[in-house]
Image: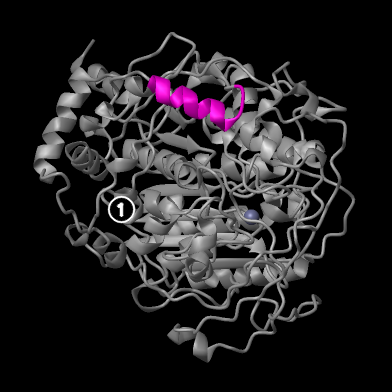
Amino acid sequence: MGEEETNMAQLGSVALNGSSPKKVAYFYDSDIGNYAYVTGHPMKPHRIRLAHSLIMQYNLYQKMEIYRAKPATRGEMTQFHTDDYIDFLQKVTPDNMDSYMREQGKYNVGDDCPVFDGLFEFCGISAGGSMEGAARLNRQKCDIAVNWAGGLHHAKKCEASGFCYVNDIVLGILELLRFMKRVLYIDIDVHHGDGVEEAFYTTDRVMTVSFHKYGEYFPGTGELRDIGIGQGKHYSVNYPLRDGITDESYKSIFEPVIENVMKYYQPEAVVLQCGGDSLSGDRLGCFNLSMDGHANCVSYVKSFGLPTLVLGGGGYTMRNVARTWAYETGVLVGQDMSRTLPYNEYYEYYAPDFELNVRSSNMENSNSREYLEKITAAVIDNLRNTGPVPSVQMQDVPRKPFGGMTDEEEAELDDLDEDENKDVRMTEHRWDKQVENGAEFEPSDDDEIARANGATRQSSNKRTFTDFGKDTEEEDAANSVEAADGKAAEANPEDSHDVNDDTIEDIGATEQEKEPAAETSVEKADNDKTDGDGDVGMTDSAPAEEEAKIKEEELETENASAPEAAGTATAEPEKPAEEPNAKQDETNASKDTEKPAGDEESKAEKAETADKEEQPADAMDVDGDKEREGEAKVTEAAS
Ligand SMILES: [Zn+2]
């Protein structure tokens, strides 16, 4: 073939534009489902495992590469979070938490964001997937990266919030900013993406766009008038919504807004947070989107052909979250999926219909067409003030060499990596477990990056979510799977029925309101003429809500309470030892599936398998991210 053809062929797999098939990198760590928040807590990491099981049973792994990311280290987390906050997360445990009462208050750890076994590791897995996904996008090793364990948008620089502790999204975006001039963040969780907005509120390098319920609802921020400040003015977009928005209504606002965002801002990469609590029937949500309506957002964003990092987020009716994320994975890889669920280890969760679907209900849509048209017009009007060329120049991005390497050296290694470390497809069913070496954290000093990127906005009126008791629908008892394992065990016996996340009763509904933090935002001061419903002065029928009370509901991380055991499974996938980023692929992950039970078990396993994965991998992790790599190296040295 001619030279041209050859070139085309070479570009084929990584083409970043157009309609060519996208190369999809999917990040999953089978340990994730073993973590559990406290009994009765609506956030259940187990949902990630349910989604993964469906993804595998639908054979989607045949159309994507599956990796297990190296958990984010302390040093990586502190690229955004403060050292003292991360140190606290690393050392606090259910057993010693009583001696950290002061810190719990300071870092908002306790109620909505409880201390649980393996908390730090859980955060590491969530953040590691997003960071590695971003790193692969940067290196054009994939067109789309997926991390359903990520999307924890409420975590703040030095504070946990809304079931989120470490903001994997901010960390992923910071990684993308090392290569991309402009990054677009889109959030379709029912809650405002406050942590991400706050981190980038003063920069034009990141545009945050959040569609969310506003008004007497956690976290209490996200008004139409909040558009960013300083250099970031107009680069924060908020679309306040009322209860019950339908597929049709959502599509009628999402598409025009995103179309205009793309037109004016022209991002080089997109991060899409797919919180599943905007689905109809969510235990904590109040929207009425069907699976198709939710997935339309994914499909629409994908249609722009930009490098995209797709993340999870909230979502408290586990079976529906799993269905939707599995379906959305299919949308991303371009695979049609039967509406009849394939048998899988968690089949009983999907009774009685056993369908791949989440239907809308007949709830009232409080978003009138007139209201939506006004908000949409206002949002688009604001976008006209933005431009495709933020003033920041690439060299302004701090790139300090990590691990003693310069960018150039890293680049060289990267090239080497291309040649010598091709992704290794695993054929085995098992992945190894990664062992986390507690000694590997070293102090880092790179928060400049975050600072440089504007991670400085002070929080405004936030609210906490304590009220996760709102039970929406009950999930049926149909599924009473019992928790078989350890962490799960944590749950009271009575909770065993909690399998589906849905039935949670309890949880103390302590509502606490946080007082509005001091507001720093300059702009805010002047436009305070909102009617309280977030739409700033728009006349709509919706009653203004009082800011004062907001319930807090969910956030993102969940715990998988008991679940685990339910299925069980088979062995875990192993990671190829060599791949630097710990990517593992696995074609067969499919079977890998889950590990059986509790953490304890898993811990044991980890210990055993420590050898395999371990860190060695990182040392070479050239290809992923430099920063990640640098740290890894440091770590090793340390250990
Ligand atoms: Zn949410």
User: Which quarter of the rendered picture does the C terminus lie within?
Assistant: top left
Disc 1 residue type (three-letter) = Leu
Q: Is residue 538 above or below residue 14?
A: below
Identified at 86% across, 45% down, the residue is 474
> Position of 39 compared to 460: left or right?
right
Q: Residues within 10 Å of mark 1 (few under 14, many from 20)?
A: many
Query: In terms of secondary structure, what is the magenta stretch mainly?
Result: helix
Please state the horizontal and vertical placement of residue 355, each as a whole percent of the image: 79, 26
> Position of 531 compared to 364: left or right?
left
Q: Quadrant of residue 497?
A: top right
Q: Quadrant of residue 200?
A: bottom left
Q: Nearer the viewer, residue 620 or 547?
A: 620
User: Which quarter of the rendered picture does the N terminus lie within?
Assistant: top left
Q: Is residue 382 above or below residue 248?
A: below
* Ligand 1 location (quadrant): bottom right
**Region of the chain picked out in magenta, as a range:** 596-609
> Position of 348 compared to 435: left or right?
right
Please state the horizontal and vertical placement of residue 383, each as a whole percent of the image: 48, 68
Find disc 1 in the rendering and name its residue. Answer: 177
